[in-house]
Amino acid sequence: MRMYDIILKKRDGMELTTAEIQYFINSYMSGSIQDYQVSALLMAIYFRGLNERETTDLTMAICDSGERADLSAIPGVKVDKHSTGGVGDKTTLVLVPLAAAAGVPVAKMSGRGLGHTGGTVDKLESIPGFKVDLGTAQFIDQVRRIGAAVAAQTGRLAPADKKLYALRDVTATVDSIPLIASSVMSKKIASGADAIVLDVKVGSGAFMRDQQSALKLARAMVDIGSRVGRRTVALITNMDQPLGFATGNALEVKEAIDTLKGRGPQDLLEICLELGATMLLLAGKADNVQGGKEILIDLLKSGQALNKFIEFISAQGGDPRVTREDGVLPAAELTAAVPAPSSGYIRAINAAMIGRSAMLLGAGRENKESQIDPAVGIVLQKKAGDTVKAGETLALVHANSTERLDQVKEHVQSAYQISADKPEPARLILGSVPEKL
């Protein structure tokens, strides 16, 4: 078997066999084929695509390039949740304790963020003392004891994905549906969950900018899950403006805690209830999504979800006082208001621009070597549909330096569109792709 023939075959629009896909991944990992040949195949896939079987074979070849987590020692149906990424997306911080409080074991392996803010583990590390580097035995024991654990994803899970992504990033082949789907699902399958709930974001602050592409990606990932025996459901959610009010690591942790206390932003609560209810449904803890939502609302009202979060923080070495005392989470040295340039209604907020502004402050990584500042970020004071008067505060910038402050304030102000007419309320849940039975 030769890589040249595989490239030629896909270039001409022909279907690759399972053996050819496995040869491609295995040879790349062993170093017997070079980057330039892999780049050529990635470009051929970008233009010619992969069918459902090919995409699943690629997913499993990537998955089998490293270790797989064995969660069989944990009783019950383990349900994982994955978001394709957005601005202010702190849903995992709410969903982990909420689902665990409902009796759904959550054994989650998460990555670090490269972009506008940190990933889930970066956010959790803004809690003083919180440890995300857990050994396998400790990870499984914690889920057995309290129903939840979040650990930093190791390089041993789906290592081929990291190599392929680095190459896709420099060859303009990132935005290929089969390549995205295989990247996401290889890591989810390797992480060992029995069922997967996918949150596919679409809009100005998401990777997928239009609903048609988001739906296509959602269907591709659900198909992969069903083909390999994982119950998988995808929701398509709106990311045309940041989720909630806070963007920034410690700021998002605080907002997640407020949500667990029943006083968080309505949009964050809505999406957490929808995702959480779907997790309960797949785990057999609810008969339907509405019933799952009612269970979760009761857990929030009773304080059981917040108590589970406290238990979860304590189990991983974090300071549980973050849930009840100000000043425990890192706080920025200065806060600057961004004024509205005119009066009217907030028509739209460019989520990507808010995310970029947070990264300029240090909330995210501009490159892999960047250090995250957990305290900085942006807290919106106005969202789409709100009225505003000229000079009124649109957002508060939390910063530890004045170096980029003026630039960030300009970016945030320009992210807002103000008009004389009140816009129609935008839907948050735009669609779904049910599991294939």
Image: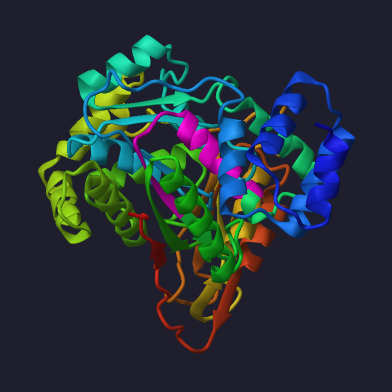
Image coordinates of residue 265 in percent, x first then y, are 33, 57
In front: 12, or 110? 12
Decide: is 209 above or below 317: below
In front: 250, or 393? 250
Image coordinates of residue 330 in percent, x first then y, are 47, 30
259 sits to left or right of 379: left
Residue at 43 percent across and 76 percent down: it is: 385
- Does residue 186 belong to the magenta stretch? yes
Image quarter where the C terminus lies is bottom left
Image coordinates of residue 349 in percent, x first then y, are 55, 68
In the picture as drawn, the residue positioned furthest to the bottom comes out as: 421
* Picture quadrant where residue 156 is located: top right
Residue 399 visible:
no
Residue at 59 percent across and 37 percent down: it is: 113
Write down the region rendered in magenta. Answer: 179-199
Image quarter where the N terminus lies is top right
